[in-house]
Image: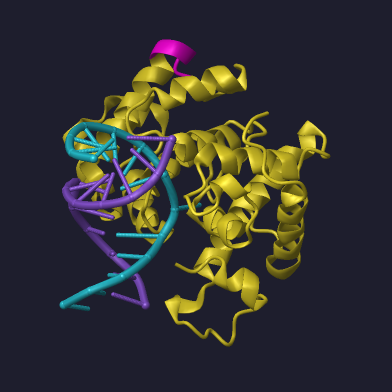
Chain colours: A yellow, B cyan, C purple
DNA sequence: CGCCAGGCCGTGT
DNA sequence: ACACGGCATGGC
């Protein structure tokens, strides 16, 4: 346990979560019908609005490649065309093909087999892939493989920084991903592992929901349902 | 027209 | 260890 946030930070973050639950209610993430669809969505939504991702997901469904075998056999150039609407298509197409290669080589081409392996092993394998950073790896672990890991994102970073949940030496700098993850872990450390999956699921969905709810980037936002401090903490 | 989006990576200090 | 620019399209 290193880089410990100052005392009480985890509890304060937990209270923010409780408030978000009350205000926004269940988010029912991840919006996907299968584990591989979650994986694909996790890649496509990198720095991309979910609206744009859905267009690509429709393309993949219509082309019959919204499954492991489909991704295995489709050519990279064809894949690029299908996912073009969600941007960065060249990198994302190559990245998705690399994921299937890893799945085939290390996990018998099965997401279920992958999910049965220890979290640290799967996480390190995912992070070794091109186009997979900590957030994408954790999103896959949590939402596709149902491992109890938190997912940190830019919205959580803003909340944590602006509510001063970091130790003094870290203030002024950007919170690292690992620090955010550690803080999230501590916020739910009182919960049994089984429940943590659901809480981490909801937590990340809610931080995104707050970001989306920031009413079109206008400074005033009179109709925002949240108190001003939390509201402002998520706006860019 | 400009900014933003459910990041990641290579490069430069 | 950070900060910064590129990646690319679609919505608003």
Q: Percent position (x, y) of residue A169?
A: 57, 45
Q: Look at the image and say whether residue A106 sits in the magenta stretch.
A: yes
Mark yes or no: residue A143 visible.
no
Quadrant in the picture for the N terminus of chain A: top right
Which residue is at a point 58% across and 40% down the rendered structure image? A179
Residue in the picture at 82% in, 34% down: A192
Left or right: A20, with A208 as reference point: right
**Magenta residues (range):** A105-110
Residue A51 placement: quadrant: bottom left
Depth order, front residue of A48/A5: A5
Of the 4 image quadrants, the one containing the C terminus of chain A is bottom left
Could you say where residue A33 lies in the image, as x and y percent from the top left? 53, 44
Residue A34 in percent (x, y) is at 53, 39
Residue A222's quadrant in the figure? bottom right
Instruction: Inspect the magenta stretch and tell me whether residue A144 lies in it.
Output: no
Q: Give the answer, above or below, for where A72 lies relative to A65.
A: above
Across and down, in percent, residue A134 comes to 47, 35
């Amino acid at each position: 346990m290193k880089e410990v946030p100052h005392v009480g930070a985890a509890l304060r973050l937990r209270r923010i979560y409780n408030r978000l639950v009350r205000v926004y209610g269940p988010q029912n993430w991840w919006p996907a019908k299968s584990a591989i669809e979650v994986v694909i969505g996790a890649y496509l939504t990198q720095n991309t609005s979910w609206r744009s991702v859905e267009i690509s997901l429709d393309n993949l469904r219509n082309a019959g490649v919204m499954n492991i075998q489909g991704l295995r056999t489709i050519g990279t150039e064809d894949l690029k065309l299908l996912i073009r609407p969600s941007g960065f298509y060249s990198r994302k197409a190559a990245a998705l093909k690399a994921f299937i290669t890893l799945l085939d080589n290390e996990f018998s081409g099965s997401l279920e087999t992958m999910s049965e392996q220890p979290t640290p092993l799967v996480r390190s394998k995912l992070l070794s892939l091109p186009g997979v950073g900590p957030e994408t790896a954790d999103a896959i672990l949590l939402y596709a493989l149902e491992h109890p890991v938190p997912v940190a994102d830019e919205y959580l970073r803003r909340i944590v920084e602006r509510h001063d949940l970091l130790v003094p030496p870290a203030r002024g700098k950007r919170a690292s991903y690992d620090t955010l993850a550690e803080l999230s872990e501590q916020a739910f450390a009182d919960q049994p592992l089984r429940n943590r999956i659901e809480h981490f699921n909801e937590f990340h969905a809610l931080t995104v929901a707050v970001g989306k709810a920031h009413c079109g980037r206008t400074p005033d936002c009179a109709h925002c349902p949240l108190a001003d401090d939390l509201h402002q903490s998520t706006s860019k």
